[in-house]
Image: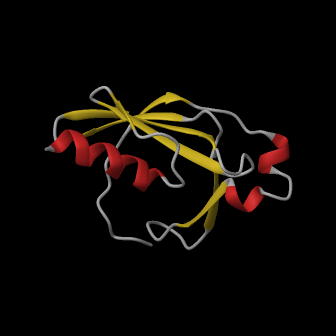
Amino acid sequence: MSKGHFTPGKLVTIGSLVPELHYGPFLRDWWYFSDSQIQDSHIYAIPIRLGFQVALKFNQKHFIIRIVRNLENPNIPGFICEGEGINSGVLSSSSAAINTIYGRVHW
């Protein structure tokens, strides 16, 4: 498990499970498997829900991350970050979306 920085967010929209994405041939792209080392050694399957939105705050700046369908391949997730009036566009990871916007608004 990564020991990176954890920033709590506020749920904006829960999103939805889409049967053809979450239970079909592309299910590996729509689930995150996390091994919890906090209390036990179980592996937890966490769905990456289409339409999910979370609000985050980094260094007194507000951001929203949304999960959408990827533009290049609609069967895999895409991520959009919005903050300070700037939109990242659809990117392949939440980290890439956040870094794109954070780099623009931080300076």
Query: Residue shown at 58%/46% (left/top)?
Result: 78
- 103 or 66, which is in the foreground? 103
Give the side of residue 31 with respect to residue 40, left or right: right
Marker count (numbered): 0
Colour mapping: secondary structure
Outermost residue on the left side: it is: 107
Left or right for 24, reference 11: right
Percent position (x, y) of residue 59?
A: 16, 42
Q: Is residue 67 above or below residue 100?
A: above
Q: Quadrant of the N terminus?
A: bottom left
Residue 54, image x, y percentages = 45, 35
Residue 31 in which image quadrant: bottom right
The outermost residue toward the front is: 72
Camera-nearest residue between 17 and 70 = 70
Pick the front one: 60 or 47? 60
- Left or right: 101 with respect to 105? right
Q: Nearer the viewer, residue 87 or 21?
A: 87
Question: Going 50% across and 55% down the picture, which residue do you hit?
Answer: 93
Q: Position of residue 85 (x, y in %)?
A: 31, 26
Residue, x 34% and y 48% (percent of image)? 100
Q: Quadrant of the C terminus?
A: top left
Residue 27 position in % (x across, y down):
77, 57
Q: Residue at x 84, y 42 (%)?
A: 19
**In terms of image quadrants, where is residue 56?**
top left
